Amino acid sequence: MNYLFNPENWEWIVTGNNVRFILQGFAVNLEIAIISMVLSLIAGLALALARLARWTPLSVAAGTWVDVWRNLPLIFIILYLALSIPSSWRDAWEDVIPSWFPEGLQSGRVVAAILGLVLYNSAVLAEIMRAGIQSLDRGQNEAARGLGMSYRQSMRLVVLPQGLRRMVPATVSQLITLNKDTTLVSIVAIQEVMRHGRIVTSANFFGGVQAPVLQVFLFVGLLFIIVNLALSRLSRRLEIRERKRTAVGEVKGVRGLEEQAAAGIG
Amino acid sequence: MKTTRWALLLVLVLGLFAAACGDDEEEPAGGSGAEPAADVEEFPAETTMGRIQEAGEIKIGVKYDVPPFGFKNPQTDDIEGFDVDLGQAIADKLGVEPNFVEAISDNRIPFLADGTVDLVLSTMTINAERDQEIDFSEPYYIAQGRILVPQDSDIAGIDDLAGNRVCTALGSTYEATLKEQAPDADLRLVDSYSECLELVQNGAVDAVSTDDVILTGMIIQDDTLKLTEGEPLTTEPYGAGIKDGDTEFQEFVNGVIEEYKSGGGWAEAYEKWVGQYTGEQQEPPTMTLEEAIEVTS
Amino acid sequence: MGDYISVLTDNLDEFLAGFWVTVRLVAFSFVIAMVVGTLVAALRIAPSKWLQRIGGVYVETFRNIPLLVLLFISFAGLRRAGVGIGPWTAGIVSLGLYTAAYVAESLRSGVFSVSKGQIEAALSLGYTYRQTLRRVVFPQAFRTVISPLGSLIIAMIKNSAIIGVSLLALPDLLKAARLVQSRTFETNEAFLWAAAGYLVLTGLATLTIRVLEKRYAIHR
């Protein structure tokens, strides 16, 4: 206990560059999370629509794809990609990336990390979206068709907007999970917060002060807790707003989405 | 209201982007900051040297986490070390700036093959297998495989490893060496040596085995650790990695290394990065590339 | 094709050993998650505001912190502080405590789904608060949460890979794949078999949950 609260063990926070160094790493995690989230949303929507397609082979193929990627450990996917991505892809990334992007994202290894995150998350999101769309009362679709809309129009104008809006809170929950998952990219030597934290703990070699592992990583944990807590508050606000908005109609299974996303903690 | 919240989140994110970017803009090239010589030889454009001179920079793969040979100083963001200094010397000879790129063990050879780097200086041991995929310079440093233990350990040599927990990196040459020379040791494999250091410091393993260079880096960070006496497990001649078949560049690099050794640069770097911590002396290596390949097979 | 088979047969020991390590990690973590999760859920629904808050802090902490950070704290951090915790313990406790937060939340919503009418009826029949919880509320709550629990188990199977890969250096299924790969350089083959192993585990978990759901679950 003494060790935990001993002020000497916390001195590293106020000396040298340590906190800034850790925050720089943390920024890389957040950036990777955002980029992956955007790409996953696009891919996830495509997969969800494929899953709901009326042409069975497509629906089955999409379903299998989603089931496989959802059930593999994310770290497994990332490590596999890191070992097998052809270097031409890595080169392409390094050519394309503008130099004002932060240094942690410059290396071609980020391709494996982001690709892994997207493959995994798009599958998870596809399931969330599918549940959101299917939770919509069938009456909506039928009413739309009854009004003369084609399947596509009904999807585009009635079903999707409502179904997707429903899953915004669940998606924000998934963003929280994604945030946490970005720490895994440290395993493929991307310079993010875990790596920076480790370097800070060996800071006394570089003329800094002793920064014990326990304290440094409690700090890192705190960073994540703060950001993720803010996101989850946001998610709850959105969910409450959703309920108020659709209080008139049936809100079937929205809770299930939150839980599903929350349960998708891996 | 909803829009404001999203906007706020976006601003927060962009702010972090900016904060991280702003500090990275001035990325120093690293190295000991030696001035490029005024009388730099110009090389023909079709050679690698000429191409590098065209580009104005040489991309060198180094380690970022192996003091004292290649590491990133978190206080200054500089890349420093013995390998880095040698890289600077090579860059100086070409009259260009060195651009140090992180090359971990897994990807340093692919990086050479696909041109991500022009040269690899990352504590890379010369051996016959690697020689098939890339070319090596003459050895520029002879490291040895040793064992690191806490000061108060009973382990005195390889034979004592039996039954003890020994850490080394997954996929490294030591994984195979230890299985061969210490088959009864309890091998713990991790991703990087900084993890091994952590494990031996907190007592989760009893010993670490790898190049003495890397072990020295650990001792520098924690002087309650020591190297065991006794026969080295292996001899590890380090060579600079060059793209397969580029004999001109290989000759050039060899020339620079020769000069470095005979002109005092090597001795200076050795003292600065190794000698002052281990208290040991060493002469610049005289081993040839052929001998190096012999020794490691 | 022959390559794939030979990679499996030549390295079967390695793969199987890794497989069982993964199974053990998940099994022990599950026990901890259920026990601690139930306790925390009880805290969350306790009549005392303070107890609720403590439970709340637990849930918010462990739901928002990455597992990898938790592993560093519980293994490296504690050991440096002088606590002689071993890699297995650190791994199982971390994964268990981490998952417990989610178990607690699931149970809590399960509890809320039990209609107030039942609780009032039980109390008016003379049951104490504790008896009501034990005999009326929790049994139903547990039955509601069978399917979210299924997702949690699958999540644990996936998260176990993080334990192996971190500095805890436990020889699980993913590690087996990497070892085989570094020895044979047959990346696709090695990882395919490990992937098969993980899919077998998650498949079994899914099937078991479905069977349990059919027999016991209450859907609300």
Image: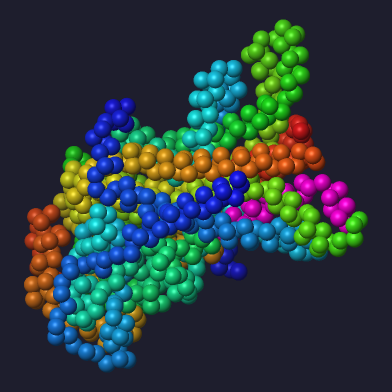
Query: B295 and B63: which one is in front?
Result: B63
Residue B108 found in image quarter: bottom left
Q: Is residue B131 visible?
A: no
Left or right: C53 in relation to B89: right
**Residue shown at the point (70%, 9%) measured from the top left:** C127
* Above or below C47: residue B55: below
Quadrant in which the N terminus of chain A appears: top left
Left or right: A66 in relation to A75: right
Q: Residue furthest top?
A: C126
Query: A228 and C132: which one is in front?
Result: A228
Left or right: A80 in relation to B16: right
**Residue shown at the point (27%, 31%) measured from the top left:** A6
Left or right: B142 in relation to C65: left
Query: Residue A133, position in %: x, y?
Result: 75, 51
Query: Residue A200, position in %: x, y?
Result: 29, 48
Count of residue discs = 0
Q: Is residue A230 visible?
A: yes
* Above or below A108: residue A143: above
Secondary structure that dominates the magenta span: helix
**Residue shown at the point (12%, 70%) measured from the top left:** B266
**Residue shown at the point (38%, 78%) measured from the top left:** B115
Query: Residue C201, position in %: x, y?
Result: 61, 47
For the magenta stretch, what is the residue range? A118-145
Q: Confirm whether the magenta stretch covers residue A138.
A: yes
* Above or below A20: residue B41: below
Q: Confirm whether the magenta stretch covers residue B130.
A: no
Query: Residue C179, position in %: x, y?
Result: 44, 57
